[in-house]
Amino acid sequence: MVDTLRTMASEHDVFTVGAEADLAAHLMAEHPGVAILDAAAVASPIERLTERLKGQFPDLILIVAGGAEDQSAVATQITSGTVYRFLHKPVSEQRVRLFVEAAWRRHGVEHSGVDYLATTAELPVLRPRSKRTPLLIGGAVLLGALLAVGAWFVMRQAGVQPARVQAPGAAEAPFAGTPRDTVLEGLLARADQALKDGALIAPPGGSAADLYTQALRRNANDPRAGNGLEKVIDKLLSTAEEQLLAQHLDEAQKLTEQARAIKPDHVRVAFLTAQIGKERERAVLAQARQAASSGNIQRALSVLDSAAREGRPSALVTEARQELEQQKQLDERIRDYLRRADERLRRGMLVEPAEDNARFLIESARALAPSDPDVRQAQRQLADRLVAEARKSLTAGNTEQAERWIKAATDTGASRDEIAALTRDTQHAATTAAADTLAHLTQLFNQRLGQGRVVEPASDSAKFYLAQLAQTDPTNAATQAAHQAFAARTLDEAKGAVHRQDYAAARRWLSEAHDAGADQTSVGAVQSGLDSAQDAARRASEFVPASSLALTHYAAPEFPMAARKNALSGWVDVQYLVKTDGSVGEVTIVSAEPVGVFEQAAVDAVRKWRYKPVMRDGQPVSQRARVRLRFAFQP
C-alpha cells in the first residue's frame, strides 16, 4: 500500500513513521485531517486505536485497511461514523486514490480549516505541493505500523508549507484599526492581568484561559493571544510537573487535564500524561508487590484490577497480574495438597496407598514450595507421626514393620537422634526375636521329624521348619544340626523304599537327602542299591520263552469236547509267572484262534506245570514266560 500511495506523489508529499508510539506526537504536531490505519501493522487492537484517535482528534477522518476480521472489529464504528471507510487488502492504486479523495472531500465539507491527511503503517505521508489543489484541503500524513527498526519519516519538501484553505463564504478576519480592536485590546488586557494574578482557569469567563480564547476567536492570528494562551498552558503544566515530582499524582493529573481542555493536542500535555501514568503504574506495582510479599495474593490482584478499571492496563501491569495469577494458582495447589495431606494423616494413610497418602501429598507440595512454612510444618508433623508408628511396631514386637516406618521417617526428614535411637532399639529387638524364633522353629522341626512328617504337609513338616531355620540364621548351630538330622532321615526313608521295591519313592527320598546336604558317599551307596533292585525288577518283568526254562513237571492240555464234535483245530498264546519255588501263577491269555474254544483248556494245563527256580546272584527270583499251545483235531 505504501507504493500505491506514492503514486499519488504528484499531489502529496509522502512520510513514514516506524512506531505506533510516535503516532500521537505526529498527529498533534501536524494537525492531520485524514488518517489511513493499516490494521496488520499496528500494535494495539484496531478498534481501540480508532476509538482513542477519534476521541483525541475528533476532526480526524479515519480509514482502516485490513482483512475480514479487522472489518468485523470496526463494523460498529463504521456504522457510528467513527471510521469513515474500510479498505480491503490487498488494495489497488485506483481504490486507494478513490478512498483518499473521498475522505478529503468529506473532510472539506466537515472541517474547512484543517491541514492534512494521516495514516498508520510504514506508509507514506502526503502533503499538497502547492495551493493549486484546493479540493484536497492540504496534504496527508501516512503513519506506519510495521514497527520495525529503521522506519523513516520524510519531512515536508523545501519551500512547501501546508495550505490553509478558507471555507467558501467565510468572513475575512478583521484588520487592525477597526472598531473591534478596542474590544480585542480590552480582552487582552484583562487576560494579561488574570495571568499575572494567577487566575489561569477560574473564574469561568474571567480567567486568563477564557479571555485569551475569546481574543483568539476575534482574531485567530493575534500573536499576543496565542502567546498568552501558551503561557497559561505552560504555567499549568509546570505546576503539574512540580506536583508530579512531589508524588501528588491526583493534583498533577488535574492540572494536566486543565491544560488539555485548553489545547488537547499540546505535546507537553501528552508527555506529562504519559509520565503521570507511569508514576501511577509504579505506585500500583509497588502496592501490589507489598501485598504479595506479605502472602496476600488476592489483595495484590485487587490492587491491579482496580488500576485496570481506571484505564487500559499497561504491559507491565498485565504481566504482573499474570504472574500473580500464576502464583495464586500455585498457592491454591499447595493449599490443596496440604489440606488433603492433613485429612490423610487423620485417617492414618501415612504412606499408603500409593500416590494417595500423606507423604506423597506433602512431598508434592514441597516440590512446588520447599521453603513454604506451612509445607515445612506439615513435613514435621508427618515425621513425628512416622516415628510414633515405628515405636508402636517395636512395642508390638513387629521389627519388620518398625524398620519400614523408620525408613519412611528418615526419608521425610525426622531427627537424626530419633532415627538413631529407633535403629538401635530395632536391632536389639530383632536379635532377641531371632533367638526366640530359632528356638521355636527347632522345637517344631524335631516334633515333625519324630512324627514322621518329614516333607508333608508342605507348610507343617520338618522340611518346612528347616527352611524357616535356614532363613532366620543359616549359620546357627541349631540350624546345622537340623540339616544333618533331616539328611540322615531322608536316607533312611530311601533305603526303606528300595527294600519295599517302591523305587519311585526311593528316588524322591534320595533327592531330598541330596538337597539337604547328606553325605555323598551314603547317598551313592543307597543309589547303587536302588539301581540294582530296579535292574532285577526290570529283568523279572521281561517275558522269556518257556523253552528257556527247566520244566520239571508237564501236564498236557485236554482237547475240548465241543471242538472235537465240530472238528476244530487252533492255538492259544499264554503268559505266566514262574515263582521262586518253581510253581506257576498269574496265568493270562494273550490271544487265541479260534476265540472262545481252547483258552480254558490251555490255562488249566499251564497251572499244573512246575519249573526249576530261576537263580540270580545265588538267589531264586521270579521269571515271566510265554508259550503257544496248539490244538490239532485228529479223527
Image: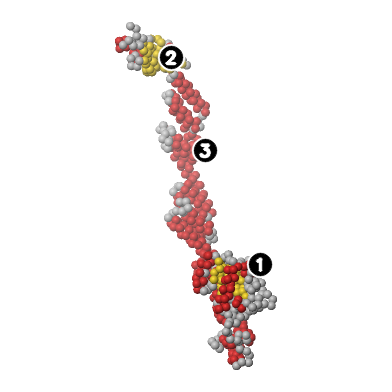
| Residue under the image location 61 percent in, 74 percent down | 140
Expressed as whole percent of the image width and height from the top left, the position of residue 361 reads 48, 56
Q: Amino acid at mark 1?
A: Gly
Q: Nearer the viewer, residue 37 or 149?
A: 37
Residue extending farthest right: 158
Expressed as whole percent of the image width and height from the top left, the position of residue 321 reads 53, 66
| Residue under the image location 49 percent in, 57 percent down | 362
Element class at badge 2: strand
Q: Quadrant of residue 610?
A: top left
Q: Quadrant of residue 198?
A: bottom right
Viewer-side label of 1, 3 = 1
Viewer-side label of 2, 1 = 1
Q: Quick check: marks 3 and 2 in contact, CB under 8 Å?
A: no
| Residue under the image location 58 percent in, 73 percent down | 101
Q: Nearer the viewer, residue 330 or 522?
A: 330
Q: Amino acid at mark 3?
A: Thr
Element class at badge 1: loop
The residue that disc 3 covers is: 475
Disc 1 from disc 3: Cα separation: 88 Å
The residue that disc 2 covers is: 545
Q: Nearer the viewer, residue 417 or 464?
A: 464
Q: Is residue 429 visible?
A: yes
Q: Is residue 214 left or right of residue 594?
A: right
Q: Quadrant of residue 40?
A: bottom right
The residue that disc 1 covers is: 150
Q: Amino acid at mark 2?
A: Pro
Disc 2 from disc 1: Cα separation: 121 Å
Element class at badge 3: loop
Q: Is residue 173 above or below residue 51?
A: below
Q: Is residue 350 visible?
A: no
